[in-house]
Image (spheres, helix red, strand yellow):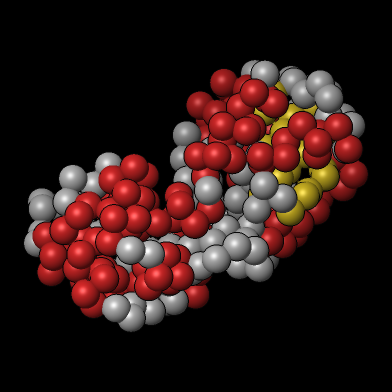
Amino acid sequence: MGRSGEPTHIPVLYQEVLQGLQVKPGGRYIDGTLGGGGHAAGILERSSPAGRLLGIDADPTAIAISIERLAEYGPRVTLVNANFAQLAEIAAQYGFCPADGILLDLGLSSLQLASGERGFSFQVEGPLDMRFNPHQGNPASELVNELSTPELADILYRYGEERQARRIARAIVAARPIHTTRQLAEVVARAVGRRGKIHPATRTFQALRIAVNDELSALSQALPQAV
């Protein structure tokens, strides 16, 4: 249970992640995708009494949630609102060089998906935003409403492996302006139809999110720093 008495979310592959990190008492660990602090709490428990954790997340909401969730660990925890692309610089600044383990749990958290105003999911109505940090960069709506058909198709194919990228891109351009998640999902569904159990807009939303947050570039920068 959380500090408020509500159930605490346990992240996917929780035990597997902790085993893979080989968490030990007194170790220093970096969680580069802090999220709701689930993995971080497990690392802190297993590394007690003197283990330390540096939590990094581009999403300021994740930092705010984790400040409360991890408060009981006091000075053993350092939380930073930043992108893990800056991993080496942040680790050096806060005394985590070298670290005994580094975690990057890529993708979205359930908290982000459930929040309509963040615009990550077509299952919840909201503005087309998709930024991990709502105060930085350009929202997905700018890509959707301003890019050319070839530019949109390239994003959908490159980051979503969407085989119908050109058809979807043409449909998006024809339907402009598009301002909400469900508007976009409906445009995609009309363009390509239903394909089994997976919603036809799934790959489109994935591709736009990756493009908006420049996720692959951030990962390519972070991995050499983590070695």
What is the total number of numbered labels drawn onto the structure image?
0
Expressed as whole percent of the image width and height from the top left, the position of residue 90 reads 80, 39
Residue at 77% from the left image edge and 24% from the top image edge? 99
**73 with respect to 22 (left or right):** right
Above or below for 107 versus 144: above
Expressed as whole percent of the image width and height from the top left, the position of residue 42 reads 65, 36
Quadrant of the image containing the C terminus: top right
Quadrant of the image containing the N terminus: bottom right
Is residue 105 shown to the viewer in this render? yes
Residue at 18% from the left image edge and 45% from the top image edge? 163
Q: Would you identify the image quadrant in which residue 217 lies?
A: top right
**48 with respect to 171 (left or right):** right
Q: Would you identify the image quadrant in which residue 73 lies?
A: top right
Above or below for 81 versus 42: below
Which of the pair 32/213 is nearer the observer? 213
**49 with respect to 65 (left or right):** right
**195 with respect to 68 (left or right):** left
Is residue 204 shown to the viewer in this render? no
Residue at 33% from the left image edge and 63% from the top image edge? 148
Residue at 20% from the left image edge and 54% from the top image edge? 166
Expressed as whole percent of the image width and height from the top left, the position of residue 206 reads 37, 52
Which of the pair 111/187 is nearer the observer? 187
Expressed as whole percent of the image width and height from the top left, the position of residue 122 reads 32, 67
Which of the pair 102/18 is nearer the observer? 102
